[in-house]
Image (tube, rainbow, N blue to C red):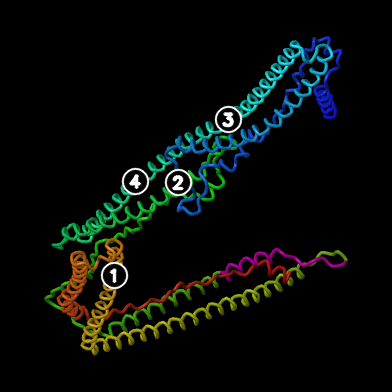
Amino acid sequence: MKFFAVFLAFVVATQASSIPGYSYWCSRNFCVYPTPNSYCYRLPFSQNWCNAKYYADCLREYPCPDPSSKNMCEEEQEDIAGFVETFRVKLETKRGKIQTALEKKLAPFECTVKNLHARYLSTFKCYLAKVLCKTSEAYCTKVEKYEEKLDDLECDAVEKFNKDVQKIIDQIKCFHEQLLSRFQTCLDTRKCRVDAYCSGLEQKSGDAQEKYEQCLTAHMTKRKEWVECIFGVIYEDTIKTTTFAEAMVAYQAMLDSDKKWYVKDFKKKIEAAVEQLKDCYRCNYKCYFNTGCYGFNRRSFRKTIKCLPAAPQYNYKLIRVCVFNPEWKAPCPAPEPEDKEEEEEETFVEKTYTDCVDVAYNKYLEDLCAKIEEWKLKVTTWKSDSDTYLKSQISCMKPKKSYCGTEPSDAEVTAYQEKLEGQAECWLDNHECRLIAQIVSLDSQWKCRIENWKCQALAYISKAKAQFDCCIANKGTKTSQYDCVLDEKICRLREQLNKRLQSMLCQHKELFESFFQCMFGCTAEGELIGTLRTDYIECVDAKVEAVLTEFDEFWCVEKPKYVTVYECGFKCMPKVSIPGLRTNWQWRFCKPSLSSFFRSYC
C-alpha cells in the first residue's frame, strides 16, 4: 500500500509538471492553465506540535521541587491567572517560531509557481504565434490577459498557502488553549483541595489542642482533689496544719504553671507538624501539562508524611495513704485477790494415805480368796456330776463278743465294768488336779500384782510428801523469781512493741513520702508545701510515743497486782489421788469332754 501511494503521487506530479500539446491548446482556444494540483503544497505538520512533550522547555509541572527553599517545593501561587498567563506568553513565542518556520517555505513555493507560469507563458506565446502575428494587437491583448490570469492564479496560490499556515497555527493555538485551560482548571481544583485539606488540618489541630488542655485541666483538678482527700483521711477530717489552705493555693498556682508549659510545648510541636503536613500534601499534589490533569503521588506522600504528634503524656501516680493509728491491745488486768477469813492450813499427813492403801490391800486379798474358793467349788461340782454320769453309762456297757461269736458271761461283764469304773475314777482325778493347778497359779499371780500395787502406791505417797516439803521450802524464792521474770517479760514486750511500731512508722513514712513526691515533686522544698510534710511527720511520731506511754503506764499500775495475785495463789496444798487396781478376777473354766474318756478306754 505504501508503494502504491508513492506511485500515484509520482504520476500526479508528472502530469502537473507536463504541458499539453498544441492540439490541446487549440481545442481549448488557448485557454490552458496549470492544473489545480500544480498549486498544491503540503505543509510539513508535525504531530509533536500537538503534544505537550514538545513544549517541555517552556512548560513544567506545578509545583516543582525547590532544593534551595526550606520547603519541599516552590511556594504557592496566589495569582493563578497571572501564573497561567506566563505559560501563554511562552506558548505564543513557541507558535511564532513554528509560524516563522512554516512561512520560510513560501519563497520556494512562489519560485516554483513562477517557473511553472513562465513555462506556460512561453508555451502560450509560442503556440499563439502560430495563429496570430506577434506584432498584432490581438496577440498582445491575449498575451496580456493570459499574464493577468497567471498572476491571479499565483496570488490565489500564495493566499491559499498563507491560509494553510494560519490554519496550522490556529490548530496549534487551539491545542495550547486546551492545555492552558485544563492546566488552569487543575490549578483551581488543586487550590480548593489543598485549602480544604489545610482547613481540616487546622481544625483537627485546634481540636487536639483544646482537648489536650481540657484533659490537663481535668487531671490537675483530680490531683488537687486527691491531695485534699488524702490529707483529710490521714488527719481524720481534722487538718491541724494552719497553712494548709495557703499551701493549696500555691499548689494550684504550680499546677497552672505546669499546664501552660505543657500546652505551649504541645502547640509548638503540633504547629510544626501541621506546617510539614501542609507542605507535604501540596508538594505531592501536582498539575501536569502532558495530561492536563492533576496527580497525587500517594507513595511519596506516605514516605514523607508525618502524623500529628501525640499529646505529651501527663504522668502522675495517685498513691493512697491510709490513716496511721497505731494501737496496743493491753492484756487482761490482774484479778483482785480473794479475801478469806480463814486460810487453809498447808499440811500433809502421810499416815492418812498409807492407811487407805492398807485398807484397799486387805480388801483386794479378801476378794481374791473368795474367788479362789468359788473356782474350786466349780471343779468339785464338775467332778461329782461327771462321776455319776460315767458310772451310769458304764453300768450299761458290755465287753465285745469273742471271735467265736459267743456272748460274754455275767462274771466277764462285771469284771469289765469294774475295770472301766477304776479307769474313770483315775481319769477324773487327773483332770481335777490339772484344774486345781490352774487356780493355784492364778492365785499366786494376783497376789503378786496386789503386792506390786501396794509398793507403787506407797512410793507415790512418799514422792508427794517430798514435793510438798520442797514447795514449802521454795515459796519465797519462787515469788522473787516471778518478779524478775515479770520484769524481763515487760521489757521484752516493750521492745517488741517498739520494734513493731517503728517498722509500721517507717513504712507509713515511706508511703507518705512517695505520695508527697508524686503530688508535689521538686517543689516539696518550698516553705508552704514543705510545712505539710514536717507537720505530718511530727504528728505520726507523737502517735507512736503516745502508744509507748500507754504501755508504760499500764504495767506501772498492773505489775504490783500480778505479783500480789501470784503470792496469794502460790499455795502448797497436797493433791494426792491414789490409782486403784483393776481387779477383774477372771478365769475361764473349760470342762473336759466326757466323750474323750469313752474314745480312749472303751
The alpha-carbon separation of the residues under discs 3 and 1 comes to 96 Å
In the rendered image, the vertical position of residue 391 relative to residue 486, given as above or below: above
Pointer 1 with pointer 2, Cβ within 8 A: no
Q: Nearer the viewer, residue 309 or 379?
A: 309
Relative horizontal placement of residue 33, taking residue 552 as reference (left or right): right
The residue indicated by pointer 1 is 504
Determine the secondary structure under disc 3.
helix
The residue indicated by pointer 2 is 75
**What quarter of the picture does the N terminus occupy?**
top right
Is residue 394 rendered magenta in the image? yes
Is residue 331 rendered magenta in the image? no
- Of the residues under marks 3 and 1, which one precedes in the sequence? 3
The residue indicated by pointer 4 is 211
Amino acid at circle 4:
Lys
* Callout in the foreground (1, 4): 4
How far across and down, in percent of the image, does residue 512 sit?
A: 27, 65
Amino acid at circle 1:
Met
* Farthest residue, direction right: 404
The residue indicated by pointer 3 is 173
- Of the residues under marks 2 and 3, which one precedes in the sequence? 2
Amino acid at circle 3:
Lys
In the rendered image, the vertical position of residue 293 relative to residue 373, given as above or below: above
